[in-house]
Image: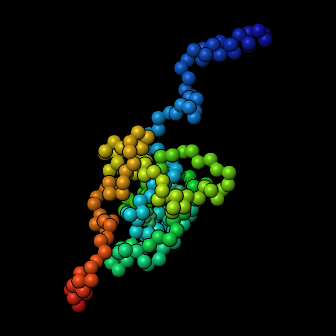
């Protein structure tokens, strides 16, 4: 009786012994990731962000913290705030991507990484400085403009802010400081 059970068990072992394994020897080997993979750390383009906080409002977990003040370059036109704080607590993130869907300016993208082991929970808060310094290798999730270019963050170069959006957006162009004459002319026009 016992002998038959052992024989059956060995048959399963032998059958799988010669099969190609599904697993890989991580971290030496890695499986290919899909370009739409929703990972950390988020790709954020400061140049495209108006500080509207739509992403923070749509996050069901309330883990995006944005603090702004009316001091942005285009604030006189009501277009942009200066961003003091932009924190995402990825320790609590479920990577649903609703914040990315909610961003009307293509400023926020899901990231393509997945290795974020930290000793402390507070180190899982991705700050504005960290977002600025991060490699701009966005996931193509919810971004048809990147999908149509067949962009793959695993094999291709970073995407800069000018090429990240669905359409050219003049408010995102860097502002050239106005000369005194230009300011006067503008003042005359608005009188
Ligand atoms: S992916 Fe989802 S849970 Fe994570 S910050 Fe965005 S909206 Fe919040
Ligand atoms: S990332 Fe997008 S949604 Fe969030 S504040 Fe900036 S522009 Fe608004």
Residue 92 lies, in percent from the top left, at: 60, 56
* Picture quadrant of ligand 2: bottom left
Question: Coloured how?
Answer: rainbow
> Count of labels shown?
0
The reply to whether residue 110 is in sight is no
The answer to whether 113 is drawn above or below residue 131 in the figure is above
The reply to whether residue 135 is in sight is yes
Q: Quadrant of residue 160?
A: bottom left
Q: Residue furthest bottom?
A: 191
> 109 and 191: which one is in front?
191
The residue under the point 58% across, 29% down is 25
Q: Quadrant of the C terminus?
A: bottom left
Q: Quadrant of residue 27?
A: top right
On the rendered structure, is 183 left or right of 122?
left
The residue under the point 50% across, 71% down is 84
Residue 67 lies, in percent from the top left, at: 51, 72
On the rendered structure, is 62 left or right of 168?
right
> 121 and 183: which one is in front?
183
The residue under the point 46% across, 68% down is 53
On the rendered structure, is 185 left or right of 116?
left
């Amino acid at each position: 009786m016992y002998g038959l059970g052992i024989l059956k068990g060995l048959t399963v072992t032998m059958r799988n012994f010669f099969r190609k394994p599904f697993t890989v020897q991580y971290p030496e080997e890695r499986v290919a990731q899909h370009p739409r993979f929703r990972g950390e750390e988020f790709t954020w383009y400061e140049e495209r962000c108006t500080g509207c906080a739509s992403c923070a409002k749509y996050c069901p977990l309330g883990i995006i913290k944005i603090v702004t003040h009316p001091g942005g370059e285009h604030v006189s036109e009501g277009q942009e705030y200066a961003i003091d704080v932009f924190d995402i607590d990825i320790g609590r993130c479920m990577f649903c991507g609703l914040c990315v869907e909610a961003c009307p300016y293509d400023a926020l993208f899901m990231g393509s990484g997945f290795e974020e082991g930290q000793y402390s929970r507070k180190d899982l808060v991705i700050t504005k400085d960290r977002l600025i310094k991060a490699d701009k290798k966005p996931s193509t999730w919810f971004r048809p403009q990147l999908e149509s270019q067949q962009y793959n963050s695993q094999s291709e170069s970073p995407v800069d802010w000018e090429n990240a959006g669905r359409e050219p957006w003049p408010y995102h162009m860097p502002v050239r400081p106005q000369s005194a004459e230009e300011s006067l002319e503008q003042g005359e026009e608005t009188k």
